[in-house]
Amino acid sequence: PGHSDTMATSTAQRVGKSSLVSSRRAERVLLPIRAVAQPFKAASAAPSARSAGASAERASTVAPKAVAVEAKKATKGARPNSQYELFTLTTWLLREEQKGTIDGELATVIASTALACKQIASLVNRAGISNLTGAAGNQNVQGEDQKKLDVVSNEVFKNCLASSGRTGVLASEEEDLPVAVEETYSGNYIVVFDPLDGSSNIDAGISVGSIFGIYEPSEECPIDAMDDPDKMMEQCVVNVCQPGKDLKCAGYCLYSSSTIMVLSIGQGVYGFTLDPLVGEFVLTHRDVKIPEVGKIYSFNEGNYGLWDADVRAYMDSLKDPKKWGGKPYSARYIGSLVGDFHRTLLYGGIYGYPGDAKNANGKLRLLYECAPMSFLAEQAGGAGSTGKARVLDVMPEAVHQRVPLFIGSKKEVEYLESFTKKH
């Protein structure tokens, strides 16, 4: 009998559990049905309440749906951001190529230029311990003493650009004449460059930089005379001598406390900082805009007595406290065009190298320095002038032609021109 009671109790427990499980399953099945049926039940009981609340219900659902649709459109194709993602120069070039702003050949030339800048940055950082300081013992075409790093940087630029296979002519500030590239197989882009601007500062550890500009070959003068050296050289010179307004890309690389590459492809100005840990230029300055005004001037005032009267009058006006509410302009001058221009680009103001009694057209080269920097200034909302005309409109007459340069904030350059254009 005890065994029978135990079996009866166990059977009852199993039946109870089975009933509980069955009721829970039934509840799960009935819940959706009740949810659907409830509105119809309420509607049959109170049809007037349904019609009265319909407008409010539609109003409450339309707005969230519209927001959801817009949000979906905005995020369509977008990838979630990652804390480890780096937006590098390579990524930026690929995006611009996808948009059709540049072609693959130009992207390759820019990437090759960036590689040259990385190598030069490493050489500059190790110059003091690699015996790369001091003079090389010869002069360039302008009669300037070349530093060891001038010579090395020039070779680095030429090698990187020639090996890209997309350049047809290379023109360097350190070379007497442009050089035709025989290894090219597509693109034929023309690259002008100053491999190491401000190299006189190298031994003192002060910031220096590289400047470059990229042109398409002139359609009127294709380089097709590889067997005739004289004709080929003539074609090279004609191809190189293009006004700055025809630049397809211009930029510079600053070697300082960090290595920063700033460039433009005609769609604004962007800055990339070299991350030494990964060896890549990372986007750090998006769509740079130079301030419209800036109370900083960057001139070599040691030449003040040799300047024209109009430039001296301009300089005197900047120093007059009465003219500027008791606070005259501040002077900042490094002696390196790249360093001085980079500060001017970020803070505003004006950089100038006017002509003087010794050098009527100043000392800066139109092709290698003035045109690329003026292109960047205008793309950032600033201006570049010779004091008489827009730099980008000047047609080069020689590969090493010099012109006066005044560059920076638009209002500041216009104020300078109010003096220089009087005569």
Image: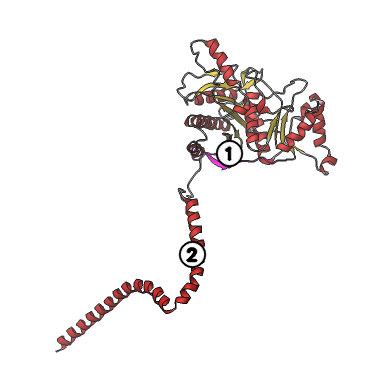
Quarter of the image where the C terminus is located: top right
Quarter that holds the N terminus: bottom left
Q: Quadrant of residue 348?
A: top right
The one nearer the camera, 305 or 230, is: 230
Q: Residue at x 49, y 66 (%)?
A: 58
Residue 234 visible here? yes
Circle 1 packing at 10 Å, graded few (<14), some (14-19), many (20+), is many
Give x and y (percent) for residue 92.
51, 39
Residue bearing the label numbered 1: 271
Residue identified by numbered label 2: 61
Task: Give how far apart the Cα atoms at labels 1 and 2 are.
Answer: 45 Å
Does residue 9 lie above or below 387 as drawn? below
Q: Looking at numbered disc 2 in the image, what kind of residue is underneath it?
A: Thr
Q: Secondary structure at mark 2?
A: helix
- The image's mark for residue 66 is none
Residue 144 is situated, as x and y percent measured from the top left of the image, at 66, 20
Q: Is residue 271 magenta?
A: yes
- Residue at the far bottom: name it: 1
Examine the structure image and report whether residue 101 is included in the region drawn in magenta.
no
The magenta stretch is 265-293
